[in-house]
Amino acid sequence: MTGCVAVIPARGGSKGVPGENLRRVGGVPLVVRAVRAARAAHGIDLVVVSTDDDEIARVAAGAGARIVRRPAEISGDTAASESALVHALDELAADGLHPRVLAFLQATSPFIDVDALGEAVGRVLAGEADSVFAAVPSHAFLRQRTAEGVTGVGHDMSSRPRRQDRDPQHRETGAFYVMDTAGFTAARHRFFGRVDVAEVPELTAIEIDTADDLAAASALAGLHAGAHARRAA
């Protein structure tokens, strides 16, 4: 039984940013950035890219990923990521590979925190949690419009405690989800059992859904590269 397999769903079609998984941030295709992050993370034994696209398959294989060809019926705009994960696990099982832990990475998150990912894998492997997801802590006051007017989300608007007097909430970044494979297979969903958070820095939290997101990520790429170089020094 394999310890941990990372699966990166990367289909060819995208309406928000055409060809987004092959778009470059810091000169590197998004799918390659995800493969490199998974390969660098402690505890991940195999990196798989699930795709329906020949060019994505070629580029991802060149970066060191195993390719699983995703069927057309689970490659459309409405297909859930979970369907690609289940299919990839079935393909691996057919080859005798049964990972204890599944790490689901999204190529549209260009700045995956490798250390946080490795720590999340370790926690699930150790049985400390069933599902761990990347998130940034937030002390934001959220509001929502209702028929009665604007109300507070999760708090009373008449009370405004200081930041240091409030426990943070956590906002998903979408970068990664690490799960006990047996639990995921039973639940068919990324959140089940004992769910916990892997806190990541705010600057890693960008997720590319639009052309503006891509431009912002490209602008931040140099900053991230400099921070990585300083940590490595």
Image (spheres, rainbow, N blue to C red):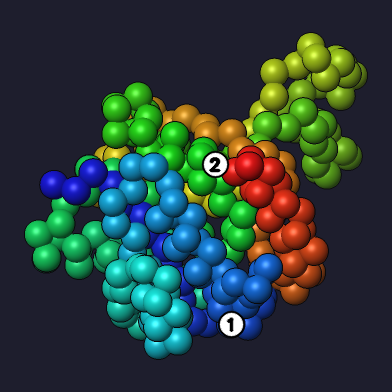
Residue 134 marker: 2
Residue at left 80%, top 41%?
144
Residue 226, compared with residue 146, is above or below; it is below
The residue identified by callout 1 is 19
Rendering quarter of residue 3:
top left
Judge by depth and name the residue closer to the eye, 45 or 20. Answer: 45
Report whether 48 appears left or right of 10.
left
Q: Residues within 10 Å of mark 1 (few under 14, many from 20)?
A: some
Task: Between residue 219 and residue 136, name the one nearer to us.
Answer: 219
Quadrant housing residue 155: top right
Q: Element type at marker 1? A: loop
Location of residue 99 with respect to 123 vertically, above or below: below
> Residue extending furthest top?
165
Q: What is the three-letter code of the residue carrying label 2?
A: Ala
Identify which amino acid the numbered label 1 is placed on.
Gly
Let me know if residue 20 appears in the view.
no
Instruction: Tell me where residue 89 appears, x and y as whole percent.
Output: 24, 59
At x 29%, y 27%, the residue is: 127
Q: Position of residue 201 (x, y in %)?
A: 67, 39
Viewer-closest of 53 and 147? 53
